[in-house]
Structures are given as structure tokens and as C-alpha cells.
Amino acid sequence: MTLRQQLRQSGERRLVWLEGDEPECIARAESWLWGEIFWLGEGPACHGPLPAAKALRRLGQECDTLVFNAFSGFHPDAFGALAGTLRAGGLLILLSPSRERWPAFADPDRLRLVADPVDLPRCGHGFVQRLAALLPGDPALDLQPAPASAPWLPLGDQHRYTADQAAAIAAIRQVLRGHRKRPLVLSADRGRGKSSALGLAARALLDEEPSLRIGVTAPARATVDPLFAHAKADPRISFFSPDHLLDEPRELDLLLVDEAAAIPAALLEGLLGHYHRIVFATTEHGYEGTGRGFHLRFKRTLERRTPGWRELHMDDPVRWSRRDPLEPLVHRLLALDASPAEPTLSAAPAWRRLSAAALAGNEPLLNQVFGLLVLAHYQTKPSDLRTLLEAPDLDIHLLESGSSLLGVALVAHEGPIEGELAQAIWAGRRRPRGQLLPQSLLAHAGFKSAGERRYARIMRIAIHPVLHRRGLGHTLLGALRTHYHAEGFDYLGSAFSAGEDLLPFWRAAGFSAVRIGLQRDAASGSHAVLMLSPLREGVAAELSEWQRRFLLTLPALLAGELRAMAPSQLAWCLPEHINVPPLEPWECDELTCFAHHHKPFELCQEALRRWLLIHAGELHRWPPEQQALLIGAIWQYTPWETLARRHRLAGKPALLTRLRQIVAARLA
């Protein structure tokens, strides 16, 4: 019996590691090729090689041989994604330099980690060193598998889907047929047929009741290709992005949310409020993010708002058996199963800075650190592990209590930018890679002096979820502020999706918004916000001027590109102390006439716009209903019918009455 026959019978897969020079490895790989072949990286044209950046084209498909040419760059996301396409009996052929030479090899994937190729020699080697240390001796490399005690039965005509998939389909049917507000959570590792089960269930329900309206949402349309394939692309099943489902609510009998862990909790809560019959499906260990943070955060929301919810976990792999050793190896290499221990506050929190090299050589600590980053951020990917271990100018900070890890912060060094390049960026002629804060301030905000400053950009900050709301995040920020002040930096800053749960934290820590991104993220539904905190007195006046310019240009943006921004998010972005000229006497008369008499809104809108600008720093403390109505009507030019629907008021006259009441009360 051949190796592939043995593996097929036992439902297993293996990794073949070919080391040496690239031409030699490619030639040796030919003898291992069989069946359906996917080739990533440089290779013979007859095998249709794809660059790692296009690996996701293969998702939803299956192969018998996967060749991963690491000479073309070891892209962790592509490796994790495509390993799941390899079916039982398959071989993953890894081509690389010898294990001794591999860490120092000029890996093209490291180009992602630097702003300029000249900085490549400054990259670390920790990620590849770790790969080369973990691979030797792993069971997935054993090419003499023990015979299976019983043959593994692949899916086919006689076994249309696994027992887990059958249970999932039945559970989805119960969501539709049972009581309202009883959501279902389907959780599974990758390769368990979760998306397929959603599609099969949708198709079965439509066969039973053709008039059903079924909606599907996910972080991206490509994510749900397997779902629509198993639903036979039925036109009665429609895809909507998460933000569109909230901005323009649909009449749906059932909503299927795939890869829910990669959608921010605020959006999921919105969906939960709008739709009464809903299924959340989440991958627990996936190349595009993870579901473990979802388990800790969103499930608490389900307990509070829909206590009748239930969960179904899918264990059975679809393309291989539970005996397969390749999946555990991929998890180990990419730290997909990294998980932090629950911390204890046995001593006063202490801060320390850790080198990437030290972290790469300490597997238990690496699993703690990366596991905590995964818990805290909904889009953490395996490629972030490489960034963590090899990116130059990236600092790793830990907050600990004794031996317990409480929190982690990743901080990138940015700026200054050389004068001629800074001028070209400001003028819109250049946009080099990296340097997010100074480039954005130069190119988008137009602050000419921004290129001269040094920034410590907080890329990630994470406190273990069981310790939230104890002030530990501010403790860690305080340590960062002290450290980077001593290092001579001008600003501590961050850029992130402006969710209402994050903005109050940053404002309370002394950070001020100086820019809001014009495009909304399709998954989060929020605009990006750039916030800064000065680290020395010499830049405080500069930051105040930047804030003033930001505020003065904001109303025009709110009437255009930022028209759909949530007022409750915007209110937290507005500078608290800003030097705006007071109202002219005639403007005060206009406000009085609007508030206490019957002057038309349109004739007073400019005075109202200036009045709201003067009070911008207070808006986050005003009631949400007042924020939404004032910002929507005065700054965002939201249509009256839209405002009336949102505020449950009977048209424009009722809205104007409420606006006059609010302004009158604020003028009193």
C-alpha cells in the first residue's frame, strides 16, 4: 500500500520538508506531486503557481498536494489558509533553505515589515527561527504512519454531511421554527463544514417554505462563498455587509452571521437588536482571526439580552480524521491555539519591556502574549505573529503581577520623515509604505510640521478580559508615557476603529483626536480615528493648533464623506478645550429666534452650526438623543424623514419642535 493510500485510509495528511537550494528543492518536489495540485510561490508554469497574496482564491476548494515555496516568502496567513484545503491522503510539500540557513535567508515576506527595503537587514529572524526549531521531529513529518484500526469514511454520496453538520442543520431549523430571540451560536475549528452547514440549512428551509427571506452577513463576501455554493446560489438568499444591515434594516425571517468573531461586538449587538431569528457562526482557530475573544465578550451580551440562546460546537473535521497530525502542527507553528492563563493580582502591577528575540525563544511566554493579543483584537492574524517577532522598531511591553501576565502593548516607532520626502507626502506626490501617523497627518490633515516629529504609535494594547475596568489599561499607558518621554519622543499616539467602547478609554487617558478617516471599515462599520497625546511641553501648542484645524474643517466633512458617522462616536472625537471665536451678537439673536420663536431652521443653520462648534467639547456628556439629533440635523444634513424614523417622531414639524426645545434648554 502506498503512503497516500495509507493516509487516505486513516484520514490523515503529512508534511514533507525539502531543504536546500531553491532549484534543487523544486526539482525534488516533482516526485511528490499527485492529484489536484495547489502551488504557492515560484514554481513550474505547468502547475499554475500563485503568489501568497492570491492564496485566498483557493479557499472553498480541495487539493491532494499543496506545495509551499518558502523561498518566495513564508506568508503565515497563506500557509494557514491553504493547509485547510488539503484533503485526507494529501501532502503539504514545504520548500525552504536548510534549517541552519533559513532564519538568515532574505525572505521576501519581510518586505511587509519595513517602510523601506533598505531597512530589511534590521528585521529580526525570530519567526523563522521558531519554525525551524518546531518542525524537526513533529509527528506530521513521519512518513511511516501506523495503520488505522478502522478505515476513515470520507464524505461522499453515501455520507453527505457529518453528524455535527446534521445537528447544526437541525438546530438552525429550530431557530426559525422555535421562539423568537433564541439565537444559536455555531462554533468550530476551521475545516469542520460550518459554512457548508449554514448553506445546506438555508437551502433545506427554502425547499420547505419558498417564501422565506434569508439574509447572510460576514466580514467580506468572499468569506461566505462555501455557504452560497452549498445553497446552490439560490437568489432568495441575499448577502449584506454588517453595517448595511444596521443602516438600512431589512425584513428578514432568518439572518445567518458567518465568521462572527471577525465582526466587532458593537455591530453584533446591533444585529441582535434588529433581527429576531439569528445564527452566529464563528471559527475558533482561523487564519483570519480567532473566535476566543468572541466567546469571552459577546457571549456575555447574549446572556444579558437573550438568555434563551444556545450553542452547538462542531468537532468532526470534514476533509480529514481526528487522527490527522498536520492540523495540530499548523496550529503550533502559527500559534493559533495560543491562550493566556487567567491572571491573578498577587502583587502590584509591574511594567517591563521585552525584546522580540527573548520572546521568540520563550514558547510558554509567547503563547501567553500572543494569546492575549488574539483575545483583545477581533482581527489578529498569523501574520501578526511574524510582525511581533521580526519587525524592526517595534517594542513589546508587558504588565505583570508576579508571574501573571495582565496586559500587553505593542508600540511602533514612527518619524521623523526627511524634509523633501515629507513635502512630497504633504503635496500628495508620494505615499511610501509605513509611517502611519506622520504620513496621515501630512497627507490627509495637511499639518506641515507633522513630518518633523517622533511618534510612539500604540498598535495594540490588551488587558486580560477578566481584569477589565480596574484601571490597568491606564496603568500601562502611564508606563508607556514615562518610557517614551524619556526616550525623546514627541507624541504617543494611536489609530483605530472609532467604536464607542474604545473612545472614552482613550479620551480619559489624555488622548485627543486630530483626524477621522473618510472611509468606513466594512466589517466594523466605523471610521478610523487618529489620536495623540503630547509627551513634552514644546508640542502642546502645536497639538492645540492641529485640534483647532481639525474641528474647523469637520462640519464640511460631516455634510459629505462623514455624513453617516454615528453621532455618539463623533461626540467622543471632538476636542474638549479648543479656541473657537465666540458667537457674534447677531448670531445669538438668530439662535434665540429659532429656539423661542418660529424662524425657519434653514435660515438659522449657519448660526446653529457655529453654536454647536463652540460646544463641541461638551457633546460627549450630553444625552445620546440630543447628540444624535443636533449633529444629524445641524452638521450632517441628514434627511428629515431619516431623522424622524430614527427618533420615532412624526415628521419634520415634530423634529423641529424637539430641536427648538433642546437649543432653548442649552441657551438657558
Image: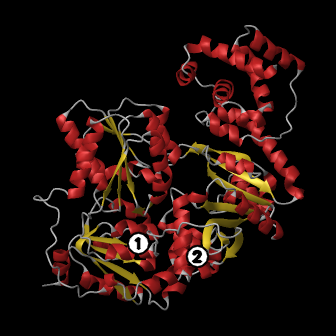
Q: How is the image coloured?
A: secondary structure
Relative depth, front residue between 645 and 109: 645
Residue in front for this viewpoint, 450 or 287: 287
Estimate the x, y position of residue 184 in percent, counting from the top left: 35, 45
Q: Amino acid at mark 2?
A: Glu
- Residue 51, visible in the rendered structure: no
Give the answer, above or below, for where 657 lies relative to 341.
Answer: above
Identify whether 497 is placed above or below 292.
Answer: above
Amino acid at circle 1? His
| Horizontal arrangement in the rendering, residue 572 relative to residue 175 (left or right) | right
Cα–Cα span, label 2 and label 1 = 19 Å
* Residue at the spot 71% in from the left edge and 20% down from the top edge: 662
Say which quarter of the image contains residue 308: top left
Tell which tag, 2 or 1, sits nearer the viewer: 1
Disc 2 residue crowd, few under 14, some 14–19, many 20+, Cα 10 Å: many
Residue 505: image location, x then y, percent: 68, 50
In the picture, which quadrant includes the C terminus?
top right
Residue under label 2: 390
Location of the N terminus (image quadrant)? bottom left
* Of pointers 2 and 1, the one earlier in the residue sequence: 1
Q: Position of residue 351 (x, y in %)?
A: 71, 70
Left/right placement of residue 314 relative to residue 160 reads right
In this image, 225 relative to 392: left or right? left
Observer able to see residue 442: yes
The residue at the point 46 percent across, 59 percent down is 292
The residue indicated by pointer 1 is 331
Instruction: For mark 2, give the secondary structure.
Output: helix
